[in-house]
Image (cartoon, helix red, strand yellow):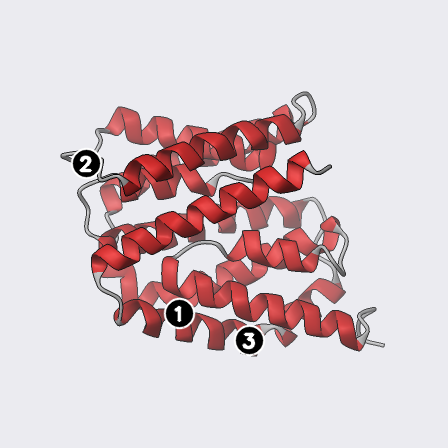
């Protein structure tokens, strides 16, 4: 046997990839949250997380050619400058800080900020280097310590005066950079197995189909509806984090 997955497990994995890729192609984020939830039903974390990282990077590669000219590169550089060195520190803090309380606290903060943005609040101009670097550092710490480093970046761009196309493009580029870095760390730790690579190869068709459908859906959505939809998705993800941790 090439893998240990039975037919039902394959269905769960491939369906999770398709749904997650659709959301990723549309909004620029959300793949990991959806895919990990589905994968966890049939795969242990040591297999699920590396698989998600591989597919995240591949999804970003599919999206980057179309959005690279729309990325706000100055803010992205400062975000990654803060996130990359802070991620290993977050992994170190994971050993001393319980993940569940931290995830609950961040989910509540993100939920509050998303509701605030839905009410119409926004920055009048792009945040400066200090705040951008600090946001990146917070993302890196949260990514390493609680695996929820994405929401601060999403809130950062959606609260800025950048248009939705620039925000979406910058979010996609950010996830490509941080996922590539995380994948390198996982590889150095020897967590990429032959089965992981085989499953990733089998998941390419639903990944590409889902991302393609998501891109097409984005191109047909007006900016304000997109912004509102992304904020509602972010609120739903925060609620899912809360329910998952409070029910344990």
Mark 1 or mark 3, whichever is nearer to me: 1
Query: Which residue is at a point 43% across and 41% down the rendered structure image?
Result: 151
**Above or below, 160 relative to 101:** below
Instruction: Please provide percent x and percent y for residue 84.
Output: 46, 36
Q: Viewed as shown, does residue 86 lie left or right of 79? A: right
Horizontal relation, residue 18 to residue 50: left or right? left
Residue 82 visible? The answer is no
CA separation, marks 2 and 3?
Answer: 36 Å
Q: Quadrant of residue 79?
A: top left
Q: Position of residue 164 (x, y in %)?
A: 24, 54
Badge 2 element: loop
Comes first in the chain, label 2 or label 3: 2
Q: Secondary structure at mark 1?
A: helix
- Reading the image, the residue beneath label 2 is 126
Sequence order check, earlier mark of 2 and 1? 2
Q: Which residue is mark 1?
A: 214
Q: Vertically, is 227 above or below 96?
A: below
Mark 1 to mark 3 CA distance (whole Å) = 12 Å
Q: Secondary structure at mark 3?
A: helix
Which residue is the site of mark 3? 206
User: In this rendering, is residue 37 above or below 99?
Assistant: below
């Amino acid at each position: 046997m090439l893998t240990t997955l039975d037919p039902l497990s394959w269905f769960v994995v491939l369906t999770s990839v398709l749904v997650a890729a659709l959301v990723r192609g549309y909004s620029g984020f959300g793949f990991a949250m959806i895919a990990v939830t589905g994968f966890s039903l049939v795969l242990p974390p040591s297999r699920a997380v590396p698989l998600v990282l591989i597919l995240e990077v591949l999804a970003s590669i599919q999206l980057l050619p179309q959005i690279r000219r729309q990325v706000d590169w100055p803010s992205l550089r400062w975000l990654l400058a803060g996130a990359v060195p802070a991620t290993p520190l977050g992994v170190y803090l994971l050993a001393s800080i319980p993940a569940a309380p931290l995830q609950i606290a961040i989910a509540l903060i993100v939920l509050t900020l998303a509701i605030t943005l839905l009410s119409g609040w926004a920055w009048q101009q792009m945040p400066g280097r200090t705040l951008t670097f600090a946001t990146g550092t917070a993302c890196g710490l949260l990514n390493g310590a609680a695996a929820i480093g994405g929401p601060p970046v999403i809130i950062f761009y959606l609260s800025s005066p950048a248009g939705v196309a620039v925000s979406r493009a910058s979010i996609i580029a950010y996830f490509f950079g941080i996922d590539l870095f995380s994948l390198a760390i996982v590889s150095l730790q020897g967590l990429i197995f032959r089965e992981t690579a085989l499953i990733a190869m089998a998941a390419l068709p639903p990944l590409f189909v889902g991302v393609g459908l998501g891109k097409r859906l984005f191109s047909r959505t007006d900016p304000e509806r997109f912004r509102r939809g992304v904020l509602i998705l972010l609120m739903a993800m925060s609620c899912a984090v809360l329910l998952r941790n409070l029910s344990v």
